[in-house]
Image (tube, rainbow, N blue to C red):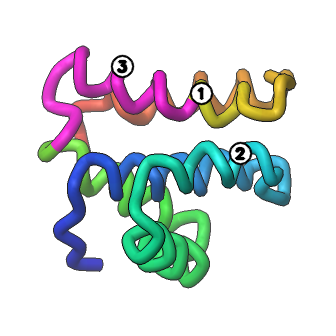
Amino acid sequence: MNLDWTYEEFSAFAMLYAASVDAEIDPEEEALIQQRLDDRSYRRVKAVYEECSDSECINTILGYQKKFMTDQAGRERLLSDLREVFEADHRYTAVEREIMHLFKRLLESEDH
């Protein structure tokens, strides 16, 4: 997938994927993500997200590693965005904590 997203578009995509780990995106989570982009950009990013399988989502996120996450600060920025979406519904479940741990391990890998 050849996308040339801004950080905000990329982050919204990653947040949509993270929000869906518990099988659905809660209204609070979606509202938080929508605030990051104008309506047209949000619809475009969400359309791409909805067409992707889990592995395509992960590959898309990892594909932006060299653009936005070349250092610890870049990785922490995305992890902070993901944590924010997990906490949007005022619940940070054990599953969400484990997903955060997996994201952290993926993003710290130098092989991508």
Question: Which amino acid type corresponds to the residue marked 3 in the rendered image?
Answer: Glu
Which dot marks residue 29?
2
Residue 42 locus on image (x, y percent): 47, 67
Of labels 3 and 1, earlier in sequence is 3
Question: Which amino acid type corresponds to the residue marked 2 in the rendered image?
Answer: Glu
| Residue 72 in the image: above or below residue 62 | above
Which dot marks residue 84?
1
Which dot marks residue 76?
3
Residue drawn where x is 59% and y is 27% of the image: 84
Question: Mainly helix, strand or loop, the magenta region?
Answer: helix
Measure how far apart labels 2 and 1 are at the Cα level. 9 Å
78 in the magenta segment: yes
Residues packed near mark 3 inside 10 Å, few (<14), some (14 to 19) or many (20 plus) = some
Measure how far apart labels 3 and 1 are at the Cα level. 12 Å
In which quadrant is the N terminus drawn? Answer: bottom left
23 in the magenta segment: no
Task: Say which of 97 and 47 sits in front.
Answer: 47
Of labels 2 and 1, earlier in sequence is 2
Residues packed near mark 2 inside 10 Å, few (<14), some (14 to 19) or many (20 plus) = many
Mark 3 touches mark 1? (CB < 8 Å): no
Question: In the picture provided, is 15 more to the left or to the right than 89?
Answer: left
- Of labels 3 and 2, the one closer to you: 2
Query: What range of the chain is rendered magenta?
Result: 68-82
